[in-house]
Image (cartoon, rainbow, N blue to C red):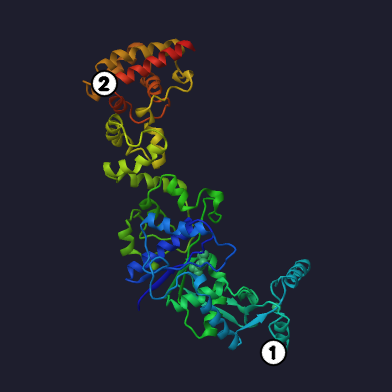
Amino acid sequence: MNIRVRYAPSPTGKQHIGGVRTALFNYFFARAQQGTFILRIEDTDQERFQEDALQDIYDTFSWLGISWDEGPDKGGSFGPYFQSQRKELYQKYVMELIEKEAAYYCYCTQERLEDLRAEQQKAKKSATGYDRHCRDLTEAQRQEYDEKGISKVVRLKIPLDGETHFYDELLGDITRKNIDINPDPVILKSDGFPTYHLANVVDDHCMEITHILRAQEWIPSVPLHVIMYKAFGWTPPKFCHLPMVMGNDGHKLSKRHGSTSLVDFRKNGYLPGALINYISLLGWSYDDTREFFSVDEFEKLFTLKKLNKAPAVFDYKKLEWFNGQYIRKKTPEELTSLILPYLIKDNVIHDPQTDKEKEILKGIIPLIQERLRLLTDVSDLVRFLFIDVGIPDSRMLIPKRLDKEKTLIVLQSYKEVLSTFIASTDEENETKFREKALELDVKLGDFLAPLRIALTGTNVSPPLFESIRLLGVESTLRRVDQAISLLEKE
Ligand code: GLU
Ligand code: ZN
């Protein structure tokens, strides 16, 4: 069997973690099975359509390096791949359902439906929804409505008794009493556009989709889709509803937990490989221990058997850690080109760089590679090497256990050690600093803190000695002098 799977986003917003996870699993499944991965744009809801959402789909997946075999931009023999361009097809199939008496025209006005809803709410009826008013209209009644030019929709007939079941590859048998299914959902709207249910079923059939991998929130729709497949006389694809993705509070992941849009992660300095790796572990695991997978490996190893039933928890901290691990794996050249746009954007370096900047740039990779978690952090870590950032507050210079006078003595004492700094090894320099600290009766940490602040304006910075080497002794001393005069004025 030629496996055919699809990712079927509605272009109503930005691509988010959940959607991307669905796309990745479909993609990996197709690759692992030598199948075909299709992108289908479910844009039948004209009111919710957002032009930039479509661009966001293209941008997100091209940034991630994931592509489809068939799709709106790729073509393929099952197109068009925009549902909005398949209207005639749905109308044809809806006629088939009407002829088979599996669907019917409903002429109810918006007003009547609203009254009905209000009434049901008042009566607190448990079975709310459409009251099947038009289900048994006679031919003559329908003609009368048509003659009056009353607009109509098409509704699917849900059987009044019995039950509908389907098999889910992950969750097993699922059965639903027909009486519990949303009574007679609209499948074709008055504007001639299909609703999700009709378009989804028709397209999955016509595009010869063999497996539906999608989020669990679609499970309630499956029984009515199955009813439709039966009415058409079609065999449904295999269903596999992916485990939920939760925030760390046990609620479904949403904006309340933090950003969920891929474009935000991209802007915030995440690497595509890290995101793909982490997102693909949401509800899937190879074994109990292995965490790192390249795209190639997922393409080989992915199987539905390794999906987990339990909901997955999206842990922002863990993703950040993953990102750090991916940064560590970059070559110096790769990492340089990754951080460059951030340094330029944050006005840390010029575009193009000056010779001096180029030189410093070469030296910073070993300083940041082990410390960076997000590419966006780079500017704060290295700004001081390119720019004299100054000291925001002179009192910052004074370590807790020292006073102003003692701090000034400490600052003055650097000059001596720094005069031989470049020619000495790190060990020698460390010894010299230690000895000086001992001589002044100050703990080494307290002794070095004012130097760090004088150089960087903050108390977090890359390793101090490497920083001094990159900055040069002359600049270092100049900043120490500035710190001294600042503190003297205090
Ligand atoms: N258009 C639906 C969505 O936005 C597709 C659901 C499905 O895969 O059937 O998720
Ligand atoms: Zn009606």
Question: With 483 as the anchor, is 158 left or right in this view?
Answer: right
Would you say the beta carbon of the disc 1 residue lies within 8 angstroms of ligand 2? no
- Label 2 amino acid? Asn
| Position above or below: 448 against 356 | above
> Which residue appears at 45% of the width and 78% of the height?
206
Q: Nearer the viewer, residue 221 or 12?
A: 12
Q: Position of residue 361 (x, y in %)?
A: 30, 34
Work out whether residue 224 or residue 94 is closer to the camera in this orientation and state it: 94
Q: Secondary structure at mark 1?
A: helix
Callout in the foreground (2, 1): 1
Q: Count the numbered circles shown.
A: 2
Q: Which mark is residue 429?
A: 2
Q: The N terminus appears in which quarter of the rendering?
A: bottom left
Dot 2 alpha-carbon crowd within 10 angstroms: few under 14, some 14 to 19, many 20 or more: some
Q: Is residue 318 visible?
A: no
Provide residue 189's location: percent of width, then percent of height: 62, 74
Residue 191 location in percent, x, y?
Answer: 62, 73
Q: Residue at x 42, y 64 (%)?
A: 307
Amino acid at circle 1 = Glu
Name the mark on residue 387.
none
Tags 2 and 1 in contact by the CB under 8 Å rule?
Answer: no
Query: Local crowd at mark 1 within 10 Å, few (<14), some, or many (≥20)?
Result: few
Q: Earlier in the sequence, mark 2 or mark 1?
A: 1
Q: Which residue is mark 1?
A: 139
Q: Is residue 362 above or below residue 247?
A: above
Residues 368 and 485: in front is 485
Give the quadrant of residue 469.
Answer: top left
In the rendered image, the vertical position of residue 449 relative to residue 58, given as above or below: above
Residue 107: x and y, percent?
A: 70, 78
Q: Say whether residue 140 is visible.
A: yes
Identify the residue shown where x is 52% and y is 70%. 84
Image-quadrant location for residue 324? top left
